[in-house]
Amino acid sequence: MASGLLFSGTNVLSLDDKGRIALPVKYRQLIKESCDGECYLAKSLFDECLWLYTKPQWDELVDSFTALNTVSQTALRSIQRTLLGSAVYCKLDAQGRILIPQELRSLCLLEKKATLIGINNKFEIWSETCLDRQRIKDAEVLQNLSDSAILNELASIAL
């Protein structure tokens, strides 16, 4: 991991009239120190949210795609088109804000509020509507996990 940053926690944020969100202070300083506030926003591959990576984490991700053979793998090309094709560079401004372009806000129904969730090496940015739907799906998945091999695997690690 290039930057060594791991993110966790949930924060509800407001979008200003220009579509900017201010990252929580606890993350703002880390990101400024680790990569001068440089980040990338992209559409999630799996959910109705955005992914926010620091530049070092994004560079690692792009490097991993470069190492793969995309010529013969249709799914990999689709992944690259979705993730890399939607990506935009952003940099924290002096107030620790990032601008979320209108196109990306529209993709995940972001309006006045956004929920920022730290997920290891990136953040997820959710609208209230999409996150409410996802939480229902997550609850169903978790309810059916009791006999799952995944849960057994996690239990052997730390749960």
Image (cartoon, rainbow, N blue to C red):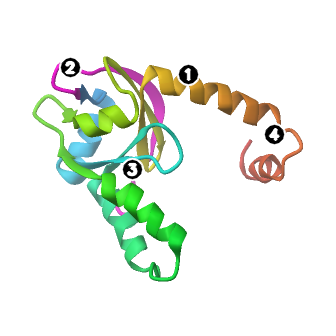
Numbered mark located on residue 5 in the image: 3
The answer to whether 104 is drawn above or below residue 82 in the figure is: above
Numbered-mark total: 4
Where does the magenta region start and end?
A: 1-20
Q: Is residue 148 left or right of residue 63?
A: right
Queried whether the magenta region covers residue 9, the answer comes back as yes
Residue that badge 4 annotates: 145
Residue type pointed to by label 1: Asp
Q: Which-is-in-front pick, marks 3 and 4?
A: 4
Q: Nearer the viewer, residue 39 or 133?
A: 133
Mark toward the start of the polypeptide (2 vs 1): 2
The CA span between labels 2 and 1 is 22 Å
| Image quarter of the N terminus | bottom left
Residue that badge 2 annotates: 16
Residue 61: x percent and y percent? Answer: 39, 64
Mark toward the start of the polypeptide (3 vs 4): 3
